Image: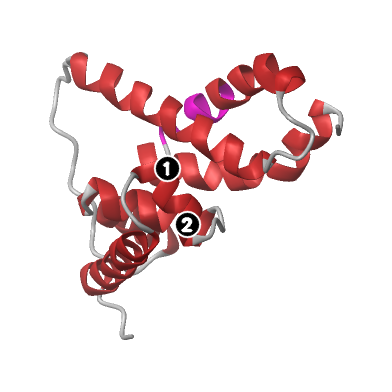
């Protein structure tokens, strides 16, 4: 079994991409931290042959759901409404547009895109995480990518 520090180094970027896709860039650091805190506690009991990346992505999914649920319960008062993001044109705006487009996908599409395209999990593992079959996960990911392309104005 690898030292936990090595696990963090090896899989940390993948978990961060999944967290960003699921909760957005603002809360991704919190979801990432919560994921590795939970993983550190459970790591000694993990089977030697376990797929560590899939295990971490599963934990990240649960932490993202917890974060989204807690966020939904909180009211955030603001003095002024935030300005709307400008249309794509600069790198910063393109990133904002990407996060907004990801947030507009259905939950199943967003998760399928994150787990397959960002975490690199095969469709059977994506299906195990989100429920359903591997072909359904493949369809959700394909629909999600198509919707992202349409929303971002990219040609296919």
Which SS does the magenta portion mostly show? Answer: helix
User: x, y percentage for residue 148?
Assistant: 28, 66
Q: Which residue is mark 2?
A: 124
Q: Dot 1: few (<14), some (14–19), or many (≥20) neighbours within 10 Å?
A: some
Q: Which residue is mark 1?
A: 129
Q: Nearer the viewer, residue 5 or 26?
A: 5
Q: Is residue 151 magenta?
A: no
Left or right side of 40 for 77: left
Left or right side of 64 for 53: right
Residue at left offset 19%, top offset 36%: 82
Q: Secondary structure at mark 1?
A: helix
Q: Secondary structure at mark 2?
A: helix
Left or right side of 91 for 121: right
User: x, y percentage for residue 78?
Assistant: 17, 20
Residue at left offset 25%, top offset 46%: 107
Q: Is residue 28 magenta?
A: yes
Quarter where residue 113 is shown: bottom left
Residue at left offset 63%, top offset 25%: 36
Residue at left offset 64%, top offset 43%: 53
User: x, y percentage for residue 11?
Assistant: 69, 43
Please report the bounds of the magenta region as a residue range.
26-33
- Of labels 1 and 2, earlier in sequence is 2
Q: Nearer the viewer, residue 133 or 140?
A: 133
Q: Is residue 87 above or below residue 15?
A: below
């Amino acid at each position: 079994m690898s030292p936990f520090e090595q696990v963090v180094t090896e899989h940390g970027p993948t978990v961060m991409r999944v967290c960003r896709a699921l909760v957005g860039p603002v809360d991704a650091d919190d979801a990432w931290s919560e994921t590795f805190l939970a993983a550190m506690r459970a790591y000694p009991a993990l089977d030697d042959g376990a797929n560590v990346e899939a295990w971490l992505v599963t934990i990240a999914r649960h932490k993202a759901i917890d974060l989204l649920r807690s966020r939904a319960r909180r009211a955030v008062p603001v003095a002024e409404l935030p300005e709307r993001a400008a249309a794509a044109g600069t790198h910063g705006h393109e990133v904002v547009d990407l996060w907004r487009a990801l947030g507009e996908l259905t939950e199943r599409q967003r998760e399928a895109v994150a787990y397959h395209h960002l975490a690199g999990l095969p469709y059977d593992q994506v299906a195990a995480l989100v429920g359903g079959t591997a072909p359904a996960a493949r369809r959700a990911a394909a629909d999600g990518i198509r919707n992202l392309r349409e929303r971002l104005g990219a040609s296919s």
